[in-house]
Amino acid sequence: MGLRDRGSPPTRAPEVWTPQLLAKVEWRVLSTAVPFRGLSTTDGPLPGLFPLERTGVDVTGLRRAAEDYLGALTAKERAEGRFVMHDVSWRYWANGARYFLRHGLCLEELDERKRELALEILRRSLSDAGFQQVLDMMRLNLTIGELRGETDTLNEWLYWFSIYGEPEKGRPWGWQLDGHHVNVNCVFVGDQMVLTPTFLGAEPVTAEGGKYAGTTVFRREEALGQQLFASLDDVQRKQAVIGDVLPEDLFVGAFRDNFELNYEGVPFAGLNEEQHRTALELVDLYVGRANPGHARVRRDEVLAHADETHFAWVGDADGVFYYRVHSPVILIEFEHQAGVMYDNDTPTRRHIHTIVRTPNGNDYGADLLRQHHERHHGGSRK
């Protein structure tokens, strides 16, 4: 299994706007022109799932980190790297390696101090494990660049960072990190935090050489999903299995903010005690990417709907597979992928995509923001 030939080595020059590329960009822009509704079943979004309330999590340090970062930027950098809270660019994230629709400031083009200030915002927003996982995905992007001889276009700092809103004024704010295989959206409304959509992926998932040799990701997410499916009895498996062939990609990836997806699979309510523990441990891997305080809040939110949560499966537990965890308040997808940088046209365990979403209108903290505007600004978006 070798590396896929992409022709002449790419450069950092502007994209060549072929008709095919123009059509792809046009489709993405048109999809974001449709008003945000959020993921739902075919019955439509459920209201009242995300109350605007205090969590008790201290976000003072987070706001200060955002203020320090903004204060270090030049006026030109602030103009390019900061957006109003309702800017449509929130929805422009994409996990591919191309540059179109990127926005904000590229970490590669920031000096070391400014880059570290940006990373400090991530560090305070995420758990230690979550922060390390994001860094490892970025480092594996360099690994594939080293293997392909394309470190100018595939490296650890080729990611765009944006600040939204007004953290210095105590108003809702957030940040986005966007690039190849790493797309994290984080919103703060008061002391509430929403960390979705979060797409993380890697190809390869293990660096066998290069600067970050030994770096590996997703093995726990892979093993726990495999363990949960292997523990199911015949009746449970008939419920869990939703297909024979892996989907072409994640159902709710980039530019699918309003996708409709019905519940499928075995309900958590139908799991025995040991299976239920494994299922919650699996959910915790994804929820636990947030800092400990907000992870506890999110876990409680998910547990409140445990009996409405479903585990769905496609594939071979000893080979490649797809799984999904889906409830009214969380949607997780994991899938082994075919090669993009490598030349394999069938899925392997060396290329993995994952995503976490908040269904029913609260990706990007949208439902919390709506309530905030209605309560404090008469419905206007400030």
Image (cartoon, rainbow, N blue to C red):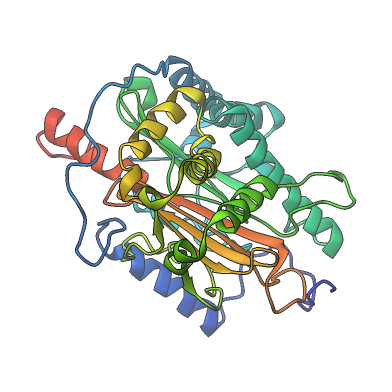
Q: Residue at x 54, y 24 (%)?
A: 124
Residue 306: image quadrant is top left
Above or below, 67 against 200 in this view is above
- Percent x, y of residue 70: 49, 27
Left/right placement of residue 154 relative to residue 328 reads right
Q: Which residue is drawn at 51% across and 46% down?
A: 275
Is residue 151 something that shows in the picture?
no
- Percent x, y of residue 111: 69, 33
Front residue (pair 115, 182): 182
Q: In which quarter of the image is the N terminus?
A: bottom right
Q: Which residue is drawn at 66% across and 67% down?
A: 320
Is residue 135 something that shows in the picture?
yes
Q: Residue at x 13, y 30 (%)?
A: 375
Q: Quadrant of the C terminus?
A: top left
Q: How many labels does the image show?
A: 0
Left/right placement of residue 124 relative to residue 187 reads right
Question: Seen from this angle, which residue lies furthest right?
Answer: 209
Above or below, 103 against 54 in this view is below
Question: Seen from this angle, which residue lies furthest bottom?
Answer: 19
Question: Seen from this angle, which residue lies furthest left?
Answer: 378
Above or below, 56 against 372 in this view is above
Above or below, 297 against 17 in this view is above
- Percent x, y of residue 154: 73, 56
